[in-house]
Amino acid sequence: MALSLGFHIVFAAIGIAMPVFMVIAEVMWRRTRDERYLALAKQWARGTAVLFAVGAVSGTVLSFELGLLFPIFMKHAGAVIGMPFSLEGFAFFTEAIFLGIYLYGRDKVKPRWHIAAGVIVALSGALSAVFVILANAWMNVPTGFDWTRDAGGRLIISNVDPVAAMQSPMAASQVIHMLLAAYMATALAVAGVHAWALLRGRDAELHRRALGIALAILIPTALAQPVVGHWAGQVVAREQPMKLAAMEQLVKTQRGAALHIGPVPVPKLLSIMAFNHPDAEVRGLEEIPRADWPHPVVRWAFQAMVALGTLLGLLALWACLRWLRRRRTPWWDSRRLLRALMVCAPLGFVAIEAGWVVTEVGRQPWVITGVLRTAEAVTPMPGLGYKFAGFALIYLGLAVTVGFVLWRMVKEAPR
Amino acid sequence: MMLYDWLALAMLGALALYACTGGADFGGGVWDLLATGPRAAEQRALIEKVIAPVWEANHVWLILLVVMLFVGFPAGFAAGATALHVPLTLMLVGIVARGSAFVFRAYGAPGRVRARWGRVFAIASVVTPIFLGLSLGAITAGEVRVAGGIVVSGYFAWVDWFPLAVGLMLLCTFAYLAAVYLCIEAETPALQNDFRRRALAAGITLGATVWTIQLTAGPGTAHFAERLFGSPWSLPLQLGTAAAALLALASLLTRRYRLARVMAVAQVWLMIGGFGLAQRPYLIFPDVTLGAAAAPEATLRFLLGALAAGALVLFPSLWYLMRVFRR
């Protein structure tokens, strides 16, 4: 499950963001009549087609695996958080329908409808992400139901309110944090590819335009992300104190807690960051049994996410400054910037994976915080190890093939 | 009818829509595998061209079906997913292989690599429907037993002749629908004739598999058979299905392809409708009824509301998609 999710999250992120790129390129083509924008829209659409298809099938695996691997979780949670999943189903349906029209209908529908189809793809992609994250937010801080355990220890859920379940206190910050991450990571990857092409001296006019669009999305999202991330962290501090403690591996409950940046402690910074006050009390892991402490990897994943977020924010700032001074020297002349973009291309996705580890592993040992433990929810099916290995091989093969197919597209693109 | 009956009806509708759209895409893969004769390459090209714009949208019916199942009948989904873990997992592998092989073929390298992805696409298209049918057969035939919310029949209860026969029947149904559709989409008379022959062959084979299923029926299917053949609605349903099937074959013989398409779709809808009526009130025969597995009333009400609202967006969009790409 974790494996499928970790695989799917990358494709989902690209599936959310890539349609925005192709639509912007197409709108630019309509406005400027510059054929290079059309070429770009078509290239990006081809990439989107491959990534969307793989995202769609890996998403199908996920929807089944919820039941295949966590039947007990679904039995209890299905009724409560089914709403976002069913709404997501419709959003995904809309996305698939209009992507079909966008990809294959260029000569069959009026240009205005063609762009409209692209816009619908982009919007419904974002919307399906919102619904899925609402369900995840509910797992982190569940709302909208009452529960008890009967004499045999079995979970009984009552008074289900599906609408309240979609309004977990985690929802807003998680949704915005993840959407920004999707746009940012994809923009960075796109920028990296086109920076590489520029460095190799490919069709400069085309790739400059591509890089321009990518940076126009990368700069605002990468600059906003640290701020939103800080907000998301404060919500975690308030709603999931033990996850925060795991992120810092803070054992003792204390006032004026320090934040470690790598191995270096900065006094009182954790209290300031989490609660806006240098002497605020931060709760430590000692409040829960040792066996319930989340795996320490949470801390390293958190550090990695924050470090990458900071790095990418600085990169965006650099690109932004170059852009502001574009009158004096065109920004694409900075080979250093291009090289940096190229090197950093995959880092957005690394940050997404790290952030996902923080939120998921940080919730352990619970699958629904405070209500249902992961170990209780998992299928009794034996031999899951083989299945895990099998799916790992399939996903590895898919990832390699997708990389190969995309690489071929980039290489054979018009020079 | 209770709320959960309406939901079950919506699921049955989604299953029928999936069979007639996404199912036919799998059927296309079957004809890709069986492409023969001087026009084999043309047959494959036509199948690819017809499927490409729509298969992802068609596939979502299955996702929607699963979502309705786990939201509306969480306990039934949990039991079914546990007992049918193996065939469902194999089906998922097939879905992943089919979909990704299809795009890799379309966008990857030409030549040998392309042919190899085509082969993966075709084989996965054959295997996947069989496992879907196996799973449907298993919940019909009393193979899956549940006591106190826990599956007691093990992980291989679905290994039996009846589920296998249902799997083969589903495969034939998909192949039949695909061949009928392709008769209309074919651009040359020669290609049209190829698929006309295939449609006739598949239609007759489908009839044969339906009879095979009766041979494999055992004590587990007695209830299902009794409901299917002994209910007040049985006679009209059987007559209607038979009439649609014969009319479809007759219109294929007389080259009235549009009429054949209408009749073939009607036949599949009636078959699935019969399955639903005979299966009611069970979700998993004989231990899990729809009522027992259903989610709380509030959830069902919201889900049905969401389905109705979603349908308002969905059907016009689908209509537009079909209008753009279908003849």
Image: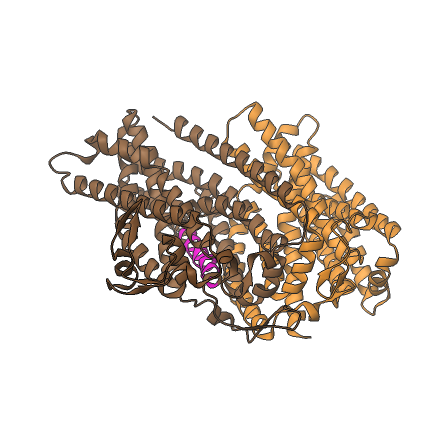
Chain colours: A brown, B orange
Q: Is residue A174 above or below residue A189?
A: below
Q: Is residue B144 left or right of residue A168?
A: right
Residue B267 x %, y %:
74, 55
Q: Is residue B64 left or right of residue A128?
A: right
Say which residue appears at 82% left-offset and 60% top-offset: B238
Residue A241 x %, y %:
39, 62
In the image, B203 versus B136, the foreground residue is B136
Q: Which range is magenta?
A: A121-138
Q: Is residue B322 above or below residue A74?
A: above
Q: Is residue B206 left or right of residue A353?
A: right
The majority secondary structure of the magenta stretch comes to: helix
Q: Is residue A355 left or right of residue B14?
A: left
Look at the image and tell me whether residue A36 can be seen: yes
Q: Is residue B279 above or below residue B167?
A: below
| Residue A299 magenta | no
In the image, A215 versus B119, the foreground residue is A215
Residue farthest left in this picture: A328
Give the position of the N terminus of chain B as an image quadrant.
bottom right
- The count of marks equals 0
Residue A152 x %, y %:
66, 70
Say which residue appears at 22% left-offset and 33% top-offset: A332
Say which residue appears at 52% left-offset and 54% top-offset: A93
In the image, B308 versus A151, the foreground residue is A151
Residue A239 x %, y %:
39, 65
In the image, A305 versus B228, the foreground residue is A305
Look at the image and tell me whether residue B183 can be seen: no
Occupied quadrant, residue B308? bottom right
